[in-house]
């Protein structure tokens, strides 16, 4: 009822307008958009970070590689998104540019958190200034800078570091299962299996291994190594 009243009063017309109860309705609408997006799970393991992403139902006319949502930001950072794919593409390009600028300026690999923070700052700006809508996308970054790390940014520009997390469709239910089943010290293979088991439990009869892509970012003697898998390669 309050939401309807707020709409009638015009509090949902701009991302710069607070409703009387302190909410920014355009931001909350954007958060609902994320939950319409396909789900992804990220898990920190002892030797790697694993991201498993659902492409949803496979269209035989679509080239598989073009639908993969797991993107390389730098040789030691990968990213996945949920929400509006075109919004994610803009922010991924921004993250890649920031990583390249850091390497040119400092002749060293950028820190994962510094890239995440800069992207979160961009997202925050679009909740503060008029003339543009908020980015309708949540992003999960996996990186290795000495240790394996996993960060998630939300609509508002906040970001948090996680041991395991989920974004997209049924994210609350997935996180509930992860809280019960996740344990520290998993191998990358065990992390992949856990993510797929969680998807299998949530999706039930709709589960199909060919719907999934995975990115495994593992520690290497030279820093990090990225391995991508799809479909039955995950088994």
Image: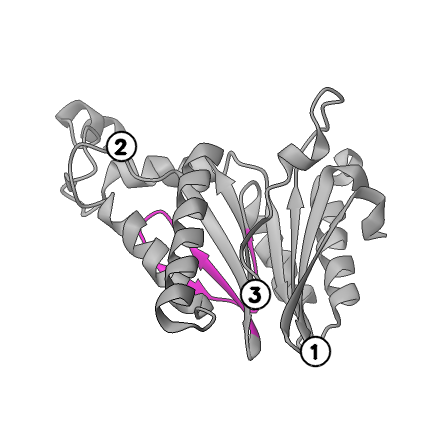
Report, in whole angstroms, how far the alpha carbon at label 1 lies from the one at label 3: 20 Å
- Kindly identify the residue that appears in the image at 36 percent across and 37 percent down: 30
Give the overall secondary structure of the magenta segment.
Answer: strand
In magenta stretch: residue 158: yes
**How is the protein colored in the picture?**
one colour
Q: Residues within 10 Å of mark 2 (few under 14, many from 20)?
A: few
Q: Residue at x 72, y 19 (%)?
A: 61
Check disc 3 and report the residue beneath it.
76
Q: Is residue 137 magenta?
A: no
- Quarter-of-image position of residue 206: top right
Compared to residue 36, the image places residue 79 above or below, namely below
Residues rendered magenta in the picture:
148-166
Q: Is residue 112 above or below residue 215?
A: below
What residue is pinned by disc 1? 185
Q: Callout 2: helix, strand or loop?
A: helix
Residue 170 image position (x, y, % from top left) = 57, 43
Viewer can see residue 120? yes
Q: In this orientation, which residue lies closer to the viewer: 1 or 142? A: 142
**Mark 3 or mark 2: which is in front?**
3
Where is residue 121, by image quadrant?
bottom left
Q: Is residue 122 left or right of residue 88?
A: left
Q: CA distance from mark 1 to mark 2?
A: 44 Å
Q: Which mark is residue 3?
A: 2
- Earlier sequence position, callout 1 versus callout 2: 2
Which structural element holds mark 1?
loop
- Let me know if residue 208 appears in the view: no
* Closer to the eye: label 1 or 3: 3
Instruction: Pick whichever, 189 or 216, lies toward us.
Output: 216
Residue 6 at x, y percent in the picture: 19, 31
- Residue at 57% across, 65% down: 76
């Amino acid at each position: 009822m309050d939401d309807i009243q707020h709409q009638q009063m015009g509090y949902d017309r701009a991302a710069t307008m607070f409703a009387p109860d302190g909410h920014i309705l355009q931001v909350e609408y954007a958060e609902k958009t994320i939950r319409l997006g396909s789900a992804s799970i990220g898990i920190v393991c002892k030797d790697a970070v694993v991201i498993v992403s659902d492409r949803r139902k496979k269209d035989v006319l679509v080239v598989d590689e073009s639908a993969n949502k797991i993107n390389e930001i730098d040789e030691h950072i990968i990213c996945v998104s949920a929400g509006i794919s075109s919004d994610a593409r803009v922010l991924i390009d921004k993250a890649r540019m920031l990583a390249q600028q850091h390497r040119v300026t400092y002749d060293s690999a950028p820190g994962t958190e510094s890239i995440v923070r800069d992207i979160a700052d961009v997202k925050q700006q679009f909740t503060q200034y008029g003339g543009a809508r908020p980015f309708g996308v949540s992003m999960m970054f996996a990186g290795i800078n000495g240790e394996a790390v996993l960060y998630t940014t939300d609509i508002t520009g906040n970001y948090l570091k996680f041991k395991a997390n989920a974004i997209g469709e049924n994210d609350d239910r997935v996180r509930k299962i992860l809280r019960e089943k996740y344990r520290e010290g998993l191998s990358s293979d065990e992390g992949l299996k856990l993510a797929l088991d969680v998807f299998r439990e949530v999706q039930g009869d709709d589960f199909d291994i060919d719907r999934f892509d995975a990115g495994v970012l593992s520690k290497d003697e030279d820093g990090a190594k990225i391995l991508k898998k799809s479909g039955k390669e995950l088994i």
